[in-house]
Structures are given as structure tokens and as C-alpha cells.
Image (cartoon, helix red, strand yellow):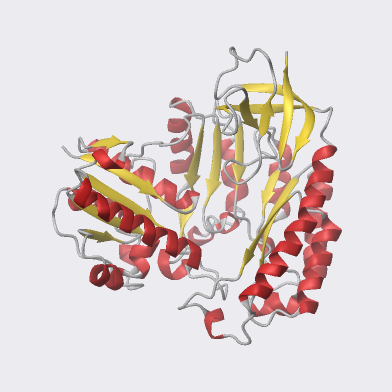
Amino acid sequence: MAKIGFISLGCPKNLVDSEVMIGLLQAKGHILIANPEEADVLVVNTCSFIEGSKRESIETILAAARLKNSGSCKRLIVTGCLAERYPGEIRSDLAEVDAILGTNQIEEITRAVNGIPVAPPDSYGRSDADLYLYDHTTPRTLVGPKYTAYMKISEGCDHTCAFCIIPKIRGRLRSRGVSSLVLEARQLVSQGVKEITLISQDTTSYGLDLGIQDGLAILLKALTGVDGLRWIRFLYVYPNLVSDRLIEVVNSSDKICKYLDMPLQHASAGILRSMKRGGTRKGLMRMIQRIRDRIPGVTFRTTMIVGYPGETEANFHELMDFCREFEFDRLGVFTYSDEEDTIAHSLRPKVPVRTAERRRRLLMRQQSSIAARKNRLLVGKELPLLVEGPSLETDLMLQGRLESQAPEIDGVCLINDSEIGDVQSGEFRTIRITRVLNHDLLGTIVG
């Protein structure tokens, strides 16, 4: 049995794929080890969503390839989005790679580890019959904290956003059944999980391919019945698909975090039309206000793209005004990445990189002021906290997250107590917020 070193890059959806592959390998007796230098086989699960992620994936593959010369590594396997998108280039340019598995070849990982030849993916050439989707019977090993886990509710995407390559890499939308997801949630809770985050390329499209309307609302309602599950949150909401029923379900249960992650991408009608997202600034304003009115205290997170082809200074200032008016609780800003094989790749004029970076800095500077002001309103409040463990900043503190702080993408709460030995990772406690520290909060455990 081989010792496997696993390196997972990219988004939480990719992490779930890695956990499934690890589970499949462990079910066959292989051993997962933390130190790549001691591995017999190295697996790099790659990302290729934007230029920066492609660069990181290639650098990681090259670093792993060097271990074939200096360590105990005998085989190097590349999986994931980069493998699906550029199998020919990997095969011709990276001779150290022994096997290439695309996003729909996850179950082939045991064959690849065992040295059995596996045909690399034919870039974007998978048929519907070849598209992969795991379920509750699939082995899966959690590699992160045992109190929280992601759960992928569907795979692929039927949207045609002009800037996005994911539908070509991942294929069409295919949803898992509600019963399978409830069973997986129960399995996760039996392993100690208390917080589940639902993920997919677009969670609000969940079930549409199965003929289910308001599938996400139905799923959330079903998951609230899972005993032992304390927090349920969901990411990646598509603006036009937030129904009244979904809003009602989110507001009806204390288990469902009042947290909405909705990548809006822009506020200018012209840019949204070019992006093939649709909508207008006024339409988005009405939608956001409707959600805030009907889910009191909701935390609203969004992401925007600046520097999209054809974005003028007027378009950008419209975006600035929109974000200033609505004061999002969380805002991520990306500079446009000009990806081949997307619709936007052929659009002109291109916005200079320096201009896009300047716009990103301006929007983030504005958001920093908004976020700091919103955080200051929390000082003195007592709120439920999920304790994560030792702080990543200092050994003298613990850290945790509020309902308004999603794992990995938002700030944290630092716990400022002289005696914190009785506070354990995965516990829910009450924290009194005492200070604001940039994007993080500082507080004291109450009781």
C-alpha cells in the first residue's frame, strides 16, 4: 500500500473532490501522509479558474516534480480543473507527470496510484454519460477541522457567463437527490461535524435538472431536521433565482445562518449584459432590499469584477456608487482575467491591467471603511461563536467565527481571555465583542 501526499488547490468544491479521492484511496488501504517529502505518490488537485490560479497550479506541479528527484516520490498524478482544461500541454511539457485525471475521472484515482494506465481527458470532450457526481455512499475523508464540512449539492453549471470557463470544465448541471444529501449530513454529524456549508457552482439552481422548483429551499428545510447539526450555510447564490420561498425558509430556522453569498459581479446594466448576467442596477437594488427587509440582520456578501472588457470610468463609478449605497457586509473584488475559450476573451476594448488594479484598490479602500464602520456596531454585543481553536496570529489567543463569518473567506473573532483552557475546538460559546481589529474582531467568552 502506498503512502499518498495530497495537495489540494482552489475552491471548496475542489477540496470536496480531494476528500472523495482520499476516501477512495484509503478504502483500498493506501495511507495519507502530511509530509509530501515522505510520499510514495503525490497527487496535485489543481485549479485553473483564472490566470493566478493556473500559475499557482503549475508552480505546485513543478515543486512536486522536484520531489521525484530528491524525495521518495515514485509517481506524480495531476488532477482537477487544470488537468481537464490542458491535458495535452501537461503531457507534452511536464514529463515528470505520470497520470492526468480530469474533473470527471475522480474514481480513476486508485488505478492511477496503482500504476494502471488511465487515458487523460479529452479537453472539454466528456459526454453526459461520463460526467461524475459523488453521493452519500462514496467514501470521503475530511481533511480539515472535524466540526465543519463542505457538502457539494450539485456539479456543473448551465449558465453561460461570458467570463467563466467552469461550465466547459465541469459540464452541465447535475444535482444530487435530497435524500442522499440528508444521509450524508447525518454521516458528517456522526463524525463530529456541527456546521455544514452547502456548495456548488450555483446553489440556487439546485434541483432544476431534476424538475424540482425551489430545490434549495426544499433541501434546507430537510437539513434542519438533522439532529446535532447546529449551523447550515450555503454559498454561491445566483441573483435572479432567490425566491420568496427560499427567503422564507432561511428566515424560519435558527439552524440556517442568516448569511447570503451572492456574487453580483457588477452594477452597470451594460456590463452585466455583456457578461451575459442580465439585470440592472435598479433591479439589483430592489432584490437586495427585499432580502434585507425579509431576513432581518442578514449578512450580505458579494464579489465584483473590475476591468472587464469595455468597462469605462463611468461604468466603474456606477459600481462604486452602488457599493457605497448598499454597504455590503462583505465584498471581494477581482480584476478581470482574460481566459481563452470564454466569450469575453474576444471582446474589445481590453482594459489595461494597471487601470483594473487601480479600480480594484479604490473599491476595496471604500469597502474597508464600510466594513470597519459595520464592525464597530458589534462592539458590546453578545453573540454565538463557533470556537475553531488556537489563533493563526498568536499562540496566546483562540479564534472562532460568528454566524456572519463563513469559513476561510471572512474574518474571525479572536478570544481575549486569560484562562481559556476549558474552551474546546468545535464548541459553541457566547462571545462579547470588545474591539475591532481590521477585518477581525476581539472579544471575551461570556459564561
Q: From the viewer's perspective, is 305 left or right of 291?
A: left
Q: Identify the image quadrant of residue 171.
A: bottom left
Q: From the viewer's perspective, is 353 left or right of 128?
A: right
Q: Position of residue 346 (x, y in %)?
A: 54, 85
Q: Where is residue 329 in the image (x, y as percent from the top left)?
A: 76, 48
Image quadrant containing the C terminus? top right
| Nearer to me, 333 or 354 | 354
Q: Can residue 29 be seen in this view?
A: yes
Q: Where is residue 141 in the image (x, y as percent from the top left)?
A: 36, 36
Q: Which residue is drawn at 62% across and 42% down?
A: 406
| Nearer to me, 259 or 355 | 355
Q: Identify the image quadrant of residue 445.
A: top right
Q: Residue at x 19, y 43 (%)?
A: 72
Position of residue 331 relative to residue 188, above or below, is below
| Nearer to me, 237 or 364 | 364
Q: Identify the image quadrant of residue 394.
A: top right
